[in-house]
Image (cartoon, helix red, strand yellow):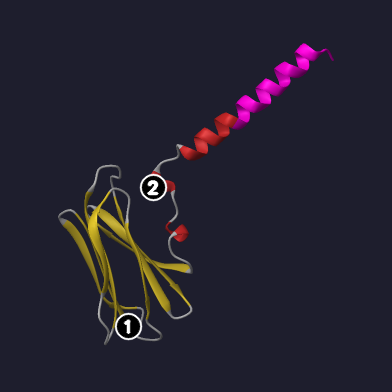
Amino acid sequence: MDSGAIRRRLALGVAVLAASGLLALASPGSAQAAGSYCSGRKVRTLPFSTGSVQVFKRDGYVCAVTFPKNQGSRKQMSVSVQARGGRPVVDKGNFSHHAGPVTVHVGHRCVLIKGSVGSGSVNSGWILC
């Protein structure tokens, strides 16, 4: 094999690696797993008109993250987790991708989860008892 062929193959390999790296970075934000924000197993998804709240549980802790249906532009979002008998832990503000994560130690108590994106919202009621 002459040096020109080796250079062409090397250039092709570098181009393929660069393209695969760009595709990985350009993947849509919704493909980002909520699991990268919360540890544990996903126990519930609470959908509503403008987004959803994903709920995770691990070792007596509950974690929640709110995601909008349409990501990109900044909009008012919030997520709240409250163990029965405790105060709610809230993350709210203008976000473009997600609100949270919010983690609370609940032990074996019921938990109340709320989330909102713009004018849409969800309230779980007391769950995971």
In the image, residue 3 sits, relative to residue 74, either above or below, namely above
Q: Which residues are magenta?
A: 1-17
What percent of the width, then of the height, locates residue 37? 43, 60
Q: Earlier in the sequence, mark 1 or mark 2?
A: 2
In the image, residue 73 sits, relative to residue 124, either above or below, namely above
* Number of numbered tags placed on the structure image: 2
Disc 1 secondary structure class: loop
In the image, residue 2 sits, relative to residue 81, either above or below, namely above
What percent of the width, then of the height, locates residue 125? 24, 75
**Residue 7 is covered by the magenta coloring:** yes
Quarter of the image for the N terminus: give it. top right
Marks 1 and 2, how far apart at CA = 29 Å
Image disc number at residue 47: none
Q: Is residue 95 left or right of residue 7?
A: left
* Residue at image location 76% in from the left, 12% down from the top: 4
| 122 or 4, nearer to the observer | 4
* Dominant SS type (magenta): helix
In the image, residue 24 sits, relative to residue 55, either above or below, namely above
Q: Is residue 116 left or right of residue 38?
A: left
Disc 2 secondary structure class: helix
Badge 1: how crowded within 10 Å, few (<14), some, or many (20+)? some
What percent of the width, then of the height, locates residue 77? 23, 57
What percent of the width, then of the height, locates residue 87? 25, 81
Question: Looking at the picture, which amino acid does disc 1 mark?
Answer: Cys
Residue where numbered disc 1 is placed? 110
* Residue at image location 61% in from the left, 25% down from the top: 15
The image quarter in which residue 99 lies: bottom left
Question: Looking at the picture, which amino acid does disc 2 mark?
Answer: Ser
Quarter of the image for the C terminus: give it. bottom left
Residue where numbered disc 2 is placed? 30
**Residue 19 is covered by the magenta coloring:** no
Badge 2: how crowded within 10 Å, few (<14), some, or many (20+)? few
